Image: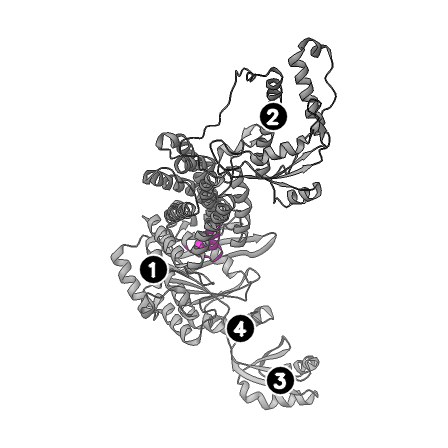
Amino acid sequence: MADYIIETQDITREFDGFKAVDGLSLQIKKGEVFGFLGPNGAGKTTSINMMVGLLKPTSGQVIIDGQDMEKFDKAAIGVCPQEIVLWDNLTCQECFKLMGDMYEVPKDVLKQRIGKLLEDLFLTDKANVLVRNLSGGMKRRLNLALAVVHQPEIVLLDEPSEGLDPQSRRVLWEYIISLRDDEGKTVILTTHLMDEADRLSDRVAIIDHGKLLKLDTPENLKKEIGGGDIVEITLTDALMNGKVIGKLEEMENVLSVLEVEGIINLRALNAVGKLPKIMDGIEEVGARMADLSVRQNTLEDVFIDLTGTRLRE
Amino acid sequence: MKFFSIAIKDLKELVRDRKGLFFIMLFPVFFMLVFGFAFGGMGESNTPHKLAIVNYDKPVTLPTTGESVNFGNNLTQLLEDAKYEDSDVHLFNVTKMSENEADELLKSRDIDAALIIPDNFSESVLALINHTIMTTTNPLAASESTPPDATSTLIIRGDTGFMNFGVSQSILVGVLAQYQDEIVIQTQNAVRGTPGTQPTVFLNSKVEPIEGTQNFTTFDFIAPGMIVFAILLLATAVAASLTREVETGTLARLKLSKMRGFDLLFGGLIPWSLVVVVQVIILLVVAVAIGFHWQGGINSLLWSLLVGVIGGIASIALGMIIAAFVQNDRQAVNLGTLITVPMSFLVGAFYPLPDVEILGVPFNAFLPWTHTVKALTSLLTYGGGWNEIAYPVVVSVILTVILFAIGVVVFSKNRLKAEN
């Protein structure tokens, strides 16, 4: 048994000269939830399409459980695509049955499995409803359930909570955690939602413009940019941002001050206690404040620290 | 048995997509109705042909009796009175009119043909009579004298692209030749005072219809082709359905499973073949209802279903090939129509065409549907059995197997392998 269940070795994928993925090398441990965090267009989906064999890398190699991608048993991987990929004119039950048959799941096992999945994802009363008549959230859950109907070792979830309402998102997150904790599955998750990556992932790979920027646990990533809270300040006149940043940098115990998309982003220990001094500093340079917020350090701040920009929607 | 699960899935999707299924079934029926009503009466025997007569003829005086005669009027009367053999139905429905009126009616196809009688027609007929008298009474002098230069030209005018004109024109040519012969014989009889003998006939011709086809209309020869047209159109529906599977991502989902290309494509054959069976039955019922003279009994129907399914499989294969190259279902429909409609003409679905040779090779003979048309026409129009359809069926099976293999290879290569 290999130490890592998936290993990508310097994989690159080009589309008409554009590098969607550029020399990506990473290793994913068995039984972990591995998060791919990056903005839309960062190369996350292209990366996982290469990992599951839907797309051939322009160069590099994907190794699954110590074997070349081509030789690996397809049934060991389950993929939940970013888009809702369902047969509108089949019922939930029929979709399950079809995918179970395609993965050669024995009839009795399949029957039990379908019952459990319907229950786990709160779809039992919709078993015989046509997919086209389900709500968006129900379709998302079914989309995920179809990826695991054959009980794969590796589950790839591409932006699984995209467009989900909070209730469906909570159901989905609980299910992802149960896949790891109760069933011992390896889950690879792509997302552009920081809290999703933060809460669910054992390790997070931050990716942008097809390149791996950082790979570690969420805690380590946040520690790496230091502790402290984040104060975000919006001035009435953004042209004053430079002067204000210069003033705030002079303050004690301020870890960093950056301008991100017209907003001043200040990271400091005990930021709340420093708020009066911050406001004094702004007044001293003759600027006026339009908005101010204080929040805890998140993975997005790690991304900002790494790229100088926010995660793009 | 993964192909069976795919077949069940495809069948359920087809049946539950009521609108789609309705159009797949209704579209060919609509064509059958249009062709049935357009060609249902055409070619049926004992139908008068609409003929306009433009008579410029000037009367002449007969030298023997001093009587003034207009042979143009005489010919017109003869055409008005002419009847089908052993029938009370007139050959022509004659209307006298001006040349301009006739041209207008020809353009609008309100008449089948116009006969223009020139002003010297009577003069020519008189010259013919005089020459006949001379050759009968004094053959030696007649051979030495030159015949009078009094030729007149009757014009049969019409739209050469109009099938009715072709029929009317051939009948008119025959009637006019007979008119001239009759003048000669009657003149000879009058001169000799006894009935003249008919010229010795060595060659004769007789039109004999195939048993059971006496009442056939053009539609009877088109209806089996219309069924093949419907079968060919399935290629477009299959291509659109497969492309939708690509577009919605469900094919990628299936690709990730243990399903093979064969399972997907062979599984797809079953529901589409059922569609073909239903289509053949519906179209045959509609065709019979609007006047198709179906020959043969239930056996011919069963054979037709088999022949139709073979043609349907060829269409499914064509659909796979189309789906392998298009990006979305709209493109699939456009390309499918672009291919299947001209192909319907090539295979002779609407009317028999001569072999279309490309670089010396008869291209249409390599299309399975050409043989489907032949087999269905043999079965349904002529009431043939296995002996009559054995050759086209065997050939179409061979061609269909080849086309299906090409379809599987091309579709699998372009759609079921990892993207390069």
Chain name for mark 1: A
CB contact under 8 Å: marks 4 and 3: no
The residue to which callout 1 is attached is A94
Chain name for mark 3: A
Q: Earlier in the sequence, mark 4 or mark 3?
A: 3
Give the magenta range: B239-253
* Real-space Cα separation, disc 1 to disc 4, in angstroms: 41 Å
* Real-space Cα separation, disc 2 to disc 1, in angstroms: 76 Å
Three-letter amino acid code at disc 4? Glu
The residue to which callout 4 is attached is A300
Q: Position of residue B110 (x, y in %)?
A: 61, 45
Q: Position of residue B107 (x, y in %)?
A: 65, 44
Three-letter amino acid code at disc 1? Glu
Q: Earlier in the sequence, mark 1 or mark 3?
A: 1
Q: Nearer the viewer, residue B211 or B408?
A: B211
Assess disc 2: are there few (<14), some (14-19) or many (≥20) residues with their C-alpha within 10 Å of its C-alpha. Answer: few
Residue A251: mark: 3
The residue to which callout 2 is attached is B177
Are the residues under marks 1 and 4 on the same chain? yes
Three-letter amino acid code at disc 2? Ala
Depicted A36 relative to depicted B193: above or below? below
Q: Secondary structure at mark 1?
A: helix
